[in-house]
Amino acid sequence: MRAVVTGGAGFIGSHLVDALLARGDDVLVLDNLSTGRRERVPEGARLVEADIRDADAVGAAFGSAEPGVCFHLAAQADVRRSVEDPAFDAEVNVLGTIRVLEAARRHGTQVVFSSTGGAIYGECDTPAPETAPRLPISPYGTSKLAGEEYLAMEGRLYGASHVSLRFGNVYGPRQDPHGEAGVVAIFLGRLAAGEPFTIFGDGTQTRDYAFVGDVVRATLAAAGHAGGVFNVGTGRETSVLELADACRRASGVELEPGFAEARLGELQRSILDPALAERELGFRAETDLDAGIATTWESISSEGVAGSRAN
């Protein structure tokens, strides 16, 4: 298969590229390297450094690759930045997605779109199925929902078979433990540095944490499907306090967290119902949270050792 992976130099994208190459696929990575890293693009994949908002660049990349599928992972993925700058969030997540869809339509390419579960459903009393009300409370969730609607519209208008995947909170090796990264990477990064981490709110807020290896399997399973929207999660919720305990167990570092005021736009409870993905994609999350965090800790701690030796 010939594939384009937007955001393929990033956290999830680079794992997906590895998996595609491992099964012998021809891969073109389209990434502007604003958050992705060139060194994450493995030998065997071709890198085009471009922004998904650039219609000409996206079109040229598709023209050179002639892909059967585009895994569209490039995004503005920071909830807090979306609140602070909703116009930029929409430019990347809505306009950028439109540019990808335009190029895909010209080349007869299926698009598998990385969306979000928690940010689209809003507060969840029970595990949210794909039919649950969509009540985003951040511009990020709203822009991802808009992207989904553009994919669905292309299905109705042009007969396209695009797929939207609503990811839970994805974690794993290569997630940046600095800046605005995911909470697992932040916690483990601080513990690796011997520094206490901060919990925003009281720590009782819950999320559905999905290991990146499982997310990649679901993403691959979506290629070739007839189209639709699928949750990609575990169906299990974990509080931030429980997550902090798991991170301390994995690291062996017993530092007590600090607490700060809850942040605007963040949910109290988020959990996905993955039953539809199991029925139609044959996907079920396999990685236990403790095992996934242990693997992530091994990666972060070994990178720290390698960095200290290099310095």
Image (cartoon, rainbow, N blue to C red):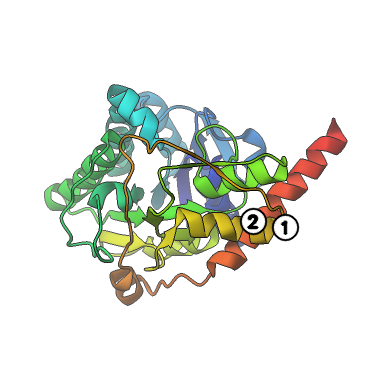
- Residue with the most extreme left position: 157
- Which element is circle 2 on? helix
Q: Please rate how many residues cluster around mark 1, counting C-alpha atoms within 10 Å: few if below 14, some from 14 to 19, many from 20.
A: few
Of residue 306 and residue 229, the one placed in the foreground of this image is 306
Q: Quadrant of residue 221?
A: bottom left
- Which element is circle 1 on? loop
Q: Could you give the CA–CA distance between mark 1 and mark 2, rounded to whole angstroms? A: 6 Å
Of residue 52 and residue 57, the one placed in the foreground of this image is 52
Q: Is residue 263 visible?
A: yes
Q: Which residue is mark 1?
A: 252
Of residue 86 and residue 230, the one placed in the foreground of this image is 86
Residue located at (27% from left, 43% from top): 105
Residue located at (54% from left, 30% from top): 33
Query: Residue 17: which disc?
Result: none
- Residue with the most extreme right position: 309
Residue type pointed to by label 1: Gly
Residue type pointed to by label 2: Arg
Residue located at (63% from left, 41% from top): 196
Does 48 sit above or below residue 184? above
Q: Position of residue 257 (x, y in %)?
A: 57, 45
Of residue 278 and residue 121, the one placed in the foreground of this image is 121
Q: Which residue is mark 2?
A: 248
Is 96 on the left-hand or right-hand side of 177? Answer: left
Q: Position of residue 263 (x, y in %)?
A: 37, 36
Q: Position of residue 209 (x, y in %)?
A: 45, 58
Asked if disc 1 and disc 2 are in contact, CB closer than 8 Å, the reply is yes
Q: Position of residue 30 (x, y in %)?
A: 49, 36
